[in-house]
Amino acid sequence: MSKGYKKFLLLWMGELISSIGGGLTSFGLGIYIFNETGSAAGMSLVTLLGFLPTLLLSVPAGVLADRFDRRLLMMIGDGCSGLGILFILICMKSGDATLVQICIGVTVSAIFSSLLEPSYRSTITDILTKEEFSKANGLVSLAGSARYLFSPAIAGLLLTVSDISLLLIIDICTFFVTITATAIVRKGVKTNHSTDRQPFFKSMKEGWQAVHGRKGVFLLIMVSSAITMFMGILQILEKPMILSFADSETLGIAESVCACGMLAAALILGIFGIKKGYASVLRISFFLAGIFMIGMSLIENIIPICIFGFLFFAMLPITNNCMDYMARTNIPDELQGRAWGFIGFLSQLGYVVAYSVSGVAADGLASLTGKGVGRGAAIMIFISGILLAITALTLLRLPEIKELENSKVQEKMVA
């Protein structure tokens, strides 16, 4: 194992712990809001406000990642994002936190969290060789999925003996672990930021050109944006769908069982990686994800939901691995931060649509059919699964995307 990969593992462990803490807060707030309002729209609003600042600030954050110390930016982002969670905790200790107060807290947390993603992705490029990217991507997917894999079951059990305040306290404590791990890695990694203090907007323009100049890369990002919309709908609506016939502890266990699919796939990728055929693997895994998403919505029974959910989430590390590799190997090293800022912004626009309309649509379908919010959510998930499968079979067959595996940019980087 190389020295760079050991540093990556330490950094990854910190992000894993932080992801679990964030998942505890996300799960707890979802249950809290649904119990207070009985509506999927309130859950969608909080999720949107916790996501939108990170999305809007991802591009300037990418420029900062190329201009300043990436590890230091990660430490600032991680540490200060805890302030929003602390605000919510204080409000709850002073009485029941209102929806407005929760929205303020998650927004503040998201603003500082926007510094993380471009710097984290760029740091991976700084410390690993190209041959290590695929294995690392599997573990990165695992850390990102920990909020769905471990957090729901832990949160569900903790809520049987305590309230949401305990979840928030644990989340705040995880920030200290992450900052410490990043600080240790920072000591042994050469700072790779640019010494050319060119105008800020010129740097942003270069990042845009890095992703837009390659038609295949840009198309891949647009496909990713469409797909994140369907996945965002599932992320929002699985809770009201299950809570319509089960309690919060069952929901937590079910979400963790489903997310075990990500664990299995991520571990396999972490050991073996993907050697070739990235475009074909990407298309097949996305198509299957759509089919499994449909299966989750068919019956009000926790067993088939867990089975199809496990299979659905098993596809996500595979798709993320393929898309990450095909984009990363077609972007010059010196533009990685700026490029990942734009990639993060464009590929996640679908989440904005999902978080904005999914809760309202589910409530509307519930009113229209008279079968409750749970079945309204299931209908939306069913439709999203169909559209996801169609998207995979059509857009991902474009030749410009296939050519990314053997591009000139990639060959130059290898040389």
Image (cartoon, rainbow, N blue to C red):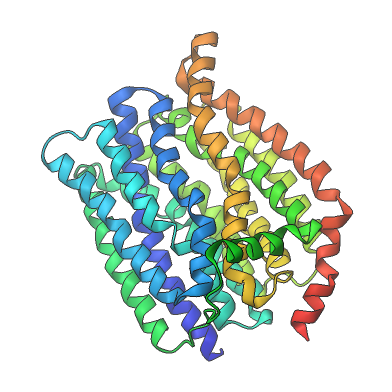
Q: Is residue 305 visible?
A: no
Q: Position of residue 122 (x, y in %)?
A: 55, 72
Residue at the far right in the pictured view: 399
**Residue closest to the eye, 341 or 372:** 341
Task: Judge whether residue 76 can be spotted in this image.
Answer: yes
Image position of 406 with respect to 35: above or below: below
Q: Position of residue 206 (x, y in %)?
A: 65, 65
Outermost residue, left direction?
94
**Circle count:** 0
In the depicted structure, whether residue 43 falls above or below residue 323: above
Left or right, 189 with reference to 287 = left
Q: Quadrant of residue 324?
A: bottom right
What residue lies at 62% left-to-right and 46% top-to-bottom? 312
- Specify the farthest residue to the front: 199
Picture quarter with the C terminus: bottom right
Residue 226 is situated, as x and y percent measured from the top left of the image, at 67, 41
Q: Residue at x 84, y 59 (%)?
A: 402
Residue 341 is situated, as x and y percent measured from the top left of the image, at: 56, 60
Along the viewing direction, whichever of 12 and 159 lies nearer the viewer: 12
Quarter of the image that includes the N terminus = bottom right
Left or right, 272 with reference to 145: right
Q: Is residue 206 above or below residue 51?
A: below
168 vs 132: above or below: above
